Image (spheres, coloured by chain):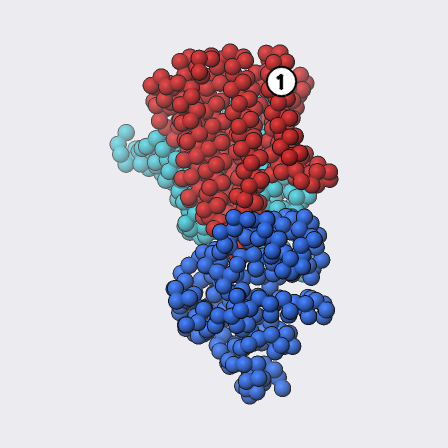
Chain colours: A red, B blue, C cyan
Amino acid sequence: MKVWASHLAVVALLLALGFLLPPYHATNMARIMVLAVFAMGYNLAFGYTGLLSLGHALFFAAGIYAAGLPIWHWGLGAAPALILGLLGGGIVAGVTGLLALRTAGVSFMIVTLMFAQAGYLTLLYFNGVTGGDEGFALPASGRMLFGADLSTDLPRYLTAWALFSATFLATLALVRSRFGRVMVALRENEERARMLGINPFTAKLAVLVLSGAASGLAGAAYGVLFGYAGASFATIQYSILPMLYVLLGGAGTVAGPLLGAVLMFALIEVANDLTSAWLFIVGAVLVIVVLFAPKGILGALRDRFFRGLP
Amino acid sequence: MSLLEARGLTRHFGGLRAVDGVDFDLAAGEIHALIGPNGAGKTTFVSLLSGRVPVQAGSIRLVGEDITRLPAHARVRKGIAYTFQITSVFPGLSVFDNVALAVQGGRGSARDLRGAVAAALSRVGLEAMASDIAGTLSYGHQRLLELAMGLALQPRVLILDEPTQGLAAGEIGNFKDLVRSLVPEVAVLLIEHNMEVVMDLAHRITVLNFGQVLARGTPAEVRASPAVQEAYLGA
Amino acid sequence: MAFGPFLLLALMEGLVTAAVLALAASGLSLVFGVMRVVNVAHGEFFMLGAVIAWFVTGMVPGPAWLAFAVAVVVAPLAVAALAALADALVLKRLNYDPEATIVATIGLLYMLQQAALTFYGPDARPVAAPFDLRLQTPWFGYSGYKLFVVLAAGVVLAGIWALMTRTKAGLVMRATQVDRDVARAFGINVDRVYMGTFALGAGLAALAGVLIVPITQAHYLMGGDPLLLSFIVVIIGGLGSLRGTLVAALVIGLSDGVISMFFSPTLAKILATLLVAMVLVFRPQGLFGTRSP
């Protein structure tokens, strides 16, 4: 119960921030929450199940385009577009997983990287349909949700908050369920899990589909809330981003992805006053976290103080 | 009909005939020991039974059903449980979670997860340690946890690979009582080097040598067999 | 232009690509083979080679060939030193854990890219070829420098081959590749072997960057394509197999030259990346893979 209470407090705090923050920071916070949804999806695969993927940009982009293209070409509304994004990410992750999950470790990383790269190049190749490198702006008709205009501050924040909260609490429920226990078992010792009657392939495939669905939802939300879709969302940078948030905040913790995203945004914001070299900061944080805090911030705190933290 | 039946089971690694045409029957409710010198193929043989190593030739039947091509996890769900020679619990998880994983993956429907875990833990005497992290347990307790995980699978056949290795003399006595209490609901296949444990527990013994069956029978018969004495007991 | 010369041109361009690729990919292959480290920053070492060559040729007075000769020596050495530093400060502390080192080299990639952007700038800049020679036949003409690149790459690769198979250093590297604990037990200084291997791999990438810069110009983002192509070559050739890497570089380089000339280069890249993924899934030893170096 304490666990649920503390996580619900995070959700409530974020809701309050929507009404307290000035517009510039509110927009940033909305962006953070959407990217945290992406990172939470990534965390299911990497943090809980031990599947280190370098191709999650593919699932994020699948969500953006599954939502964005019907809006652009056929004038679809935001609500069905978000659902399409969720499905798009899940389906693409399922197909990828069917092949990639025959490998493990370094091979799995490279296979997912290659699939994502092929996806990115495919978006460029069919630029007549996808808008290619330049992408496209989502028309206003596709940015209306239940009568609210998502290009305005408060509706945008509240939509991001709702999607974040749903994913956040669903993750908490999942990792505390029987299946959550199986995920951790696969991460810790796959062969032992197999000898307890667990089918590693189907279990990992299910995780990857869930992870891809969350990533796709995040992608769709990003497109709908901020009004732009482009092939750059399928580049390797967008595979590294959720990994960075998860590593920094704490892999295999429910709140780690949010914490990592907030910290990275804050860091780049502060550094922006000093230098424009934000890529350097991303790189340096990756190296420093891997070297000195491989379990991330919440992971280190859990080891020391809160043993039961999910 | 025997519970578990293997016919002509074969597995070669390169030129090495690890298991070479072995016939084997495990009867319901028996404790059957598998012995033989180092490298005789005992571990490979039970790996074939449990599905960890694919069979090259021969067949395996469980209660008459052909399971030769079934993957390992599916065999576990059919009721063949394997406990590892080297203790292989999940060190980062609690004792409860370790056993809960076995309950979830096993044969029972496990509606009452907590009850099933508690039952398996009390069977081996670890009920007080349910919330401990498995990696912090003593070696003897980890072996008991391993056994509890095997029991929680609710198996028909429980394969124990060198279960007494590394246990203190006092712990071995408790362990023997525990294994005896499992039959006749479960049939136990035991790989064991400790002859005292084998002679004391086993109803029947199969002796492997160079991947083939050298002898088979009651402890008394095996002890009396000149071939076994020559190859193995060294008497 | 008639078809014959056109195809010959495509093959020549492919041969140049193959030569440069073989250099860069053999560096990646060496590092993976000996250290089991997938160096994602490999393309940035290539880029740094080109960028440093631009700085060096700008600073050295005198004829173009002299400035370029200095760059050929200085740039790979500087990059190798940087790689050795990265090995000591980062990779060694990670105990060469395969997954952690990938994450760390991704970080390194970003840092190097940003450093190049900050100190070198966003523009593509040319470096003069060391000599201006054009081979001309009545029906076909070709740049002498490009032929020089092919020749130079061949000589260096032959040198690497000899190093690995004929020298004590190569023997030590191969021993470490087979089993680092056993190598250590036999008194091999594994840390030094790893540092040397990582520096050598980076130096090869940098040399490839120097050789290509008179043809393509130096740019801070130029490391992406060689990284991807090197990956493709190393995986199709069989992870860690130097011989497979060379064969694959030739195949990929030539087919890239020909396919890009007749079809869309994007389509060619899509097919190549998918091929890599499929090779890893269904034939992890590579298409030409043998286990020997």
Which residue is nearer to you in this view: C244 or A27? A27
- Is disc 1 placed on a helix, strand or loop? helix
Callout 1 environment at 10 Å: few (<14), some (14 to 19), or many (20+)? few
Q: Which residue is mark 1?
A: A16
Of residues B13 and A162, the one drawn nearer to the viewer in this rendering: A162
Q: Position of residue B127 (x, y in %)?
A: 67, 54
Question: What residue sits 41% from the left and 23% below the top?
Answer: A81
Quarter containing the C terminus of chain A: top right
- Residue type (three-letter) at the residue carrying disc 1: Ala
Name the residue: 68% across, 70% down: B173
Extreme-left residue of the structure: C2
* Residue B28 percent coordinates (x, y): 48, 70
Is A160 situated above or below B203?
Answer: above
Q: Is residue C21 visible?
A: no
| Number of numbered callouts drawn | 1
Is residue B140 shown to the viewer in this render?
yes
